[in-house]
Image: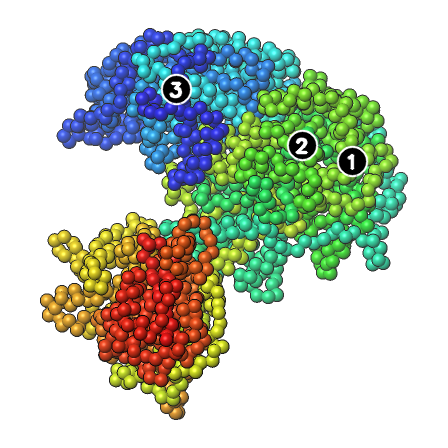
Amino acid sequence: MGNSYAGQLKTTRFEEVLHNSIEASLRSNNLVPRPIFSQLYLEAEQQLSSLEAGSRADNEEEEEEEEEEGSESSSPVSYQMKPPPEGCCTTDGFCQAGKDLRLISISNEHIEVPSGFLLVGAKSPNLPDHLLVCAVDKRFLPDDNGRNALLGFSGNCVGCGKKGFCYFTEFSNHINLKLTTQPKKQKHLKYYLVRNAQGALTKGSVICWKGAEFRGRQSSSSTCSSTLFQLPESSGLSGSTSSEPLPAANPSAPSGTQQTAAAIDHIPSTAAFSSAVYNGKESPKQHLVKNNLSALTRPSVLGTLTNSGPPKKRHKGWSPESPSSSETWNLQLNPQAPNRIKNDGGSLSSLPHSALVGPASSPMVGSGEPVSVPDNLLKICKAKPVIFKGHGNFPYLCGNINDVIVSSLLYTCYRNSQSLSRAYEQYGASTIQPISEEMQLLLTVYYLVQLASDQVPLIEDLEQIFMRSWRESHLSEIRQYQQAIPQTFPQVPSQIAPVTSAQLPWLAGLAASSCNDSVHIIECSYSLAEGLSEMFKLLIEGKLIKTNYVVIICASRNRAIDSCIVITGKYQARVLSESMLTPLDYQKEVNYQLVTGKVETLGSFFSTLCPEGDIDLLLEKFYQENQGHISSSLSASVNKPTALNGTGAAVCTSYEIERHQIRPFQLAVAQKLLSHICSIADSSTQNLDLGSFEKIDFLICVPPSEVTYQQTLFHLWHSGILLELGLEKEHLTKQRVEQYVMKLDAEAQIKFKVFLQNSMQNPHTLFVLIHDHAHWDLMSAMHSLYPQTELSTGLVDRLLNCREVKEAPNIVTLHVTSFPYALQTQHTHISPYNEIHWPSSYSNGVDLYHENKKYFGLSEFIESTLSGHSIPLLRYDSSFEAMVMALGKRFPRLHSAVIRTFVLIQHYSAAMMAVCGLSQMKNYTSVETLEITQNLINSSRQCPSGHGLMVVLRIPCTPLAAVAYERLYNVRERLALEDNFEIILGNPNSGITIGKHFVEQLKVWQKIEDVDWRPQTYLELEGLPCILIFSGMDPQGESLPRSLRYCDLRLINSSALVRTTLEQELGLAAYFVSSEIHTEKAVVNDVLESDPEKLSSTDNEDEEIATEGSTSEKRSPMKRERSRSHDSASSSLSSKASITAFCSESSPPLIAAGDTVKSPHQVLSNSAEETTNNYERQKQKVDKGAQTTISKHLPPVTEQLDTKQNIKSAQISITSSSSSPFSSSSSSSAPTHNSFILQTSQCSMTKASKQPPIVFLPKLVYDIITSTDSSGLPKSSSLLPYHSVMWASSFRPLMSKMMTCTEQSLYYRQWTVPKPIHMDYNNRNEGRMDTFHPRRLLLSGPPQVCNKNKIGKTGAYLQFLSILSRMLIRLTEVDVYDEEEININIKEESDQYYHQPGDMWPDLETFKKMPFDYTIHDPKYEDASLICSKLQTINSEDRSMNRRQEDMYTRRQTTRMRLSKYAAYNTYHHCEQCHQYMGFNPRYQLYESTLHAFAFSYSMLGEEIQLHFIIPKSKEHHFVFSQPGRQLESMRLPLVTDKSEDYIKSPTFTPTTGRHEHGLFNLYHAMDGASHLHVLVVKEYEMAIYKKYWPNHIMLVLPSIFNSAGVGAAHFLIKELSYHNLELERNRQEELGIKPQDIWPFIVISDDSCVMWNAVEVDCSGDRKSDYTWTERNVSLKQILQHIEATPNVTHYALIGMRKWSSKTNSAEIKEPFSCCHVHDFIMLNVDLTQNVQYNQNRFTCDDVDFNLRVHSAGLLICRFNHFSVMKKQIAVGGQRSFHIKSKVSDTPVSISPAQYICAPDSKHTFLAAPAQLLLEKYLQYHSHRFFPLSLKNYSHPVLSVDCYLNLGPQIAVCYVSSRPHSLNISSSGLTFSGLLLYLCDSFVVASFLKKFHFLKGATLCVICQDRNSLRQTVVRLELEDEWQFRLRDEFQTANAKEDRPLFFLTGRHI
């Protein structure tokens, strides 16, 4: 703090800062998110408000502290330690005499301690995990209050025995502390050391230094807000909201107490650390150097507390950027006993009850009198009290300890809340104190006071209360501290005294006085023992009947407070105690109660409830009386229509099977997955070489649920993916499909071993390992809590995390889940960049995917409970809950799961009986159960085909599910309903069993002929009326059919409050509904109004449809008031069947033995009054939870609604609900005694499939789901995400409602750590990237299981496999041009062949006799002008095709070819062989390169040309450098006589532009690994991007003046540079005795799109000499170049080239193996012979044709090897496409036609931003007929073109002549020309030369010059006016501005 903060600090709201932090983390390169508070800078305020001014009460203490810490108040200066004496020991942990001082080593040794001395533990910064034992005079140590320590030091070394150290500096040197700061005893002497019962020396209490972070009680100096006492009224500390800041009081440390021998030695200590990274650097861990914790007097069994933070409060040099380890911790009693209230159990879940009570389990054991637990406590109190240890010492418990449960959960919460996270410590030093223990306890009392009688305390709520309280106090203190900086640290007097230990009991009692004794305060004088004894006494005496919580406080002026909290409320104690059971213990307990017959008492009690006698007797009596009647009447509706189907009766048409199709958002997800795979492949880490894979294989891992397994097989079969990937042939069998799906059970290892073997045997196959339902079984294989017989536990870890999978380069792992939270911890294997989240359907109100199905998930269910909806889809059953609560008090020893199950079975049994006519049984069920049952039984009657509804009854405990199945099955049989609906026991370990009658029905509906068919998935039960008893501790991915109508979750384990568990259970009801149905109902909710990218649901990033009751109603920015239809009181006209639903909170429930419940008639008579009562009660609870938020945003009127009007509107909405797609199918009429038939006859399955199911929840879960925290998110979102992870710190921010899934992921990655039982526990992150597995991805999407066609994640990842396969195939293929040669018919047909077909090389003398073929045959020049060599008769139609400019590239024919092993590649290719060639190596930095200038003069340009070479270090051996200055001298050239198999002599130059990614510059494979010199020729402005992509390639950078030039400039400079280099090499090597003519003169100029090369092999073994056969195959470029380089007399050839490949090549084309004709694309150029022939540096197109004509006219030989061909890849970017012609005036792209490329001089024509030469060439190509009208299609009279070839378009022929003396030209005698083209004539063109040619009358002339002056001079010099007529208007110029140097034209007519 202090001066280190230069800027002013922001007062941003915390949630905004959190959001910004996560967003910044997403954009930063640093993978570890920065701590949130590192961005919370504070504003310096001018005035301190008295409310915020927290100061020390004692100024004298402050001054003393200043003196003591004076050395620390200045900037930290590094401390120079005195060097140790020569030869002494300097090992850490040993003294200089070499004796071991570590506590762990000498704890059992006898140590002589002089009188008056104490053994203390010193901390060495180099040994953070060890204490060094020292003997110190106790006079120099402080007392318990931090006072009375003498200044100075006196100590002895216990190792060597040396005594009399008078200075701590000297002593610290002796014990090798090796300090970098000034040694101070206060810093390094940390703990007293004491002997335990075994005599071993152990760490005791902390030494309480005054002024250090461990402050004494009496120096508490923080402030307490005056708003404190308003809390009970305002409910401001509710777990939901907090509207006012709560400054916390100063911490106070408990006095040191000696450790006793009761520590549990067998429980290992565990501390979880997390490390943050500041500024991208990993900070060093500093342990316990400065500790901002309260003094801990706990045994070391709790683990080592570590702390590393900023310097103390007056260090001026501390800044937020200083490296500091942001370590947080959660210390546990046991690594398998996490310290949270939930992990399907609690903090001590894995310990037996005997370990939870008494001295053995206490982390803080006192030595006082033990407290005896009274006998029969459970019997008397009807519940086991749960004792939460708080502060201080806890006494021994003895006696009946099995009747109490002791937990250290609260103690851990208190301790964590005093362990300030490093994220906050950077704001200052010791002024910022944690919450004092007094304030912690007071806040806890406030929290308990505001809890309702049916609420259970949540540790998350308490942590957030502490967090908010501390934060507000923290901010005000920082402001105060900052304002004081300019002064000499003055103290602002405290306005309000802090809470003292003496005031605490009084304040706590005051707070508890308003809660009707639900919280009872007991104050003790001496120890907690007396308070506990009093509490037990009050319990036995029955004086705590109304009390839910007892707070025991032992406060004394002279020492720390002791406290504990006892949960005595029967409901709360039961829930909390059951939450401490692990899933295994939970099942064991239930099994035990079932096996031992303890539940029989429950059954006998039920039988007493029914006045008519036992229900079984009633059933039997009913069966006997009605046998045969009900069966026929009720089953008629089922059987009759089935019989009528064949007779043409009306059949239900709603049973439609959706065909398998890919949804738009599935395709979007698949493409996102593919994009991430490509990103991995494209990264420089080389972790995935997609180019090396030829095909895809996969394995899908699913949980060991038979239904899920069969379901996945079903989707895999129908997707067709196996056939598409080529993995299977036609006639697919189920056995073959099963090879690709693995059930994670005992047999999985065999199948997985086969998978691994396949992956190793097929390195060119990419294997995708898909882990579906990935949140299931994340147990570590090393820390399994389950018995070893259950092999499936930890199987995911054993298989998917095995070394073979991690290291295999061809295995990609994809985790797929709806609940990714447990895979998003600090130690996760999955990079945040490899997460794929389900996309949002909407953006700014626009439907992105045009999807006809909309998702209905958790947020939509919650939305339905808000007012404005006709019927809430989430409900709870208040009468059921009341009965369960009453029975729970009556049977305290029975687990609540047993009670709830038996009550629900009873309700369903009674409901079935009531529907069948036993109307009196309606009194023994609830309205909800009655509604479910009557709709189920009657559903099949409404459909002509007998379709019905499905009811899912979720019973997690398998034994209880079996009991329920058996009971309901028997009741159904007795009621003769066995043909009406089916009861199915859904066990995850077994398949589906249903009756034969129902199988036949399903076969008829689904048109199945197979006799042996049986349904194997729940999806196949669509339309079947049934109760599905869904068992198993967790759903395992089973999908449910669209006919699901009710999802009864009343029996889920409501005590296991974990986010994943809750959302997973609710995910059973998630649904895709047809969006068309809801168009009039759907309105976009508030998330869209604020930001479409944000979430209110935490399921997904999908758009949420809120189904409103009114289209005009919109949600307020916060939450609307909840509807009074929480339970189903208003969902039907009949009210509750139990009056307990309307009991006031103070009156006890009325259900007890012998009590009867009001009949519906009685209830109906009072329905208005009771509904009103219920509404007020519900509203009151909502107000408690969200009072502050609602009152801010809703008008006051809403809080005083007219109840009668509400009831009336409710009735209206119910009676009209048949038109509502969300209405219950039974809600259109009120049930009466005899009428259970619904008024509508519409098929109920049809209605069910068009709306989401109705969900019934336990009340506790309902409250959590529907209440929101202060951020607006459902409270369930803030729960612990998964039972095998824990929070990294209690001091964490709340999640924000506006978080996207990506931000949620980063939140969990920062704030959660895995427990030791989690499979990621050992994957320590420490902020480095290397713990992320590079080939592991995570796909998270919304849970949706109610659909026939898998339109969710399964379909998405199967589609991903499909497009990945297609991409791999595409990666191994390439589109190459496949075009026949053009102008073949013009070719001279001759019977003369100069060479034999099998000749390998041309014969020089023979070749000289071959005529040159002027005609262009390359198909890319199909639009080019024909070159005439003699009088030709050409069919005019052949050349008349007139194409648009944009057709140039699109019309060309291509074919797809498989890449061979000799292909050239672009930058996307990565393989191990060419890593070094490419220059990407993860072990090294990018290859270093040096820039070298290379200059030479060229007379034609009139100036010196300066080029630059970029030469990587690895390629410098190709060049010669001057020795002193390392100046580039030349490029090495070999000799003509050199011969080597592994060397290519010709340097290769590749000019390129715009193709840094797509250019084929990787010639490693093409050259077959041979050494070669390859130079990329790039423009200056593209140099950086090419260097980035090709760091190991030599670059030749053209001068900047050529940035806008065409390919001609590159060719020109390549040739000139090469010739200049040849001269330099000749001079250099001549000095070595080598003749100049022996230097190799050839270079290769290659296009950047040449991809493969082919060779024709000719077999001339026929009988006749002319007979031959030929084959063409792909060969390496090395083979071709070495063959050409070996040509005899090769230096006599000027140009050597090869054919363009075509699949249509015929024998005639290769019969002559060599041609003298044009060569293109890939040429070998003899720079020596062509010294005087230049490329035209101005040209953009046809420059190679122009150059070929110049070379031939110079008398040089051009040879084309017809047996070799080059394949050119079609590249859609770069090259000629890089040149865009646009207006120079406007930046807006406007289409400009070629006719506008020229204009009249001095006109106001729009100038164009393009080179003049490009405009000229393009204009002549498309509009040359304007200049040469006589030449159009007049091929017998071509245009005479002097010294150049310009493309005048395909309809005009040209004749090329050279004006050079002695040049070879065609005979022009007999030729009459239709035009003359003079382009930039030089001095060789003279008047006499032109007069040799003859022109048609009216022929046109076009003269082109650089400027108008040259134009006139040329006309005069060539005497053109003698034969040509010119007009002033015939002068033109290119449409360039003057500064762009336009070209000028003059046209004339021949006279």
Q: Residue 1560, image x and y in percent?
A: 37, 61
How would you rate the neighbour count of disc 3 (Cα within 10 Å): few for under 14, some for 14-19, many for 20 or more? some
Q: Is residue 258 above or below residue 1691?
A: above
Q: Amino acid at mark 3?
A: Ala
Quadrant for the C terminus, please. Answer: bottom left
Q: Is residue 858 left or right of residue 963?
A: left
How would you rate the neighbour count of disc 2 (Cα within 10 Å): few for under 14, some for 14-19, many for 20 or more? few
Secondary structure of the residue carrying tag 3 is loop
Q: Is residue 1192 left or right of residue 1942?
A: right
Q: Nearer the viewer, residue 753 or 1041?
A: 1041
Residue named by callout 3: 44
Residue 1458 can be seen, yes or no: no
Residue 20, by quadrant, is top left
Q: Is label 1 or label 3 in front?
A: 3
User: How far is the residue under mark 2 from the one under mark 3?
Assistant: 44 Å
Residue 1098, by quadrant, is top right
Q: Amino acid at mark 1?
A: Ser
Q: Amino acid at mark 2?
A: Glu
The disc at residue 1216 is 1
Residue named by callout 2: 1113
Marks 1 and 2 in Cβ contact (< 8 Å): no
Q: Is label 1 or label 2 in front?
A: 2
Q: Is residue 1630 left or right of residue 1699?
A: left
N-terminal-most mark, 2 or 3: 3
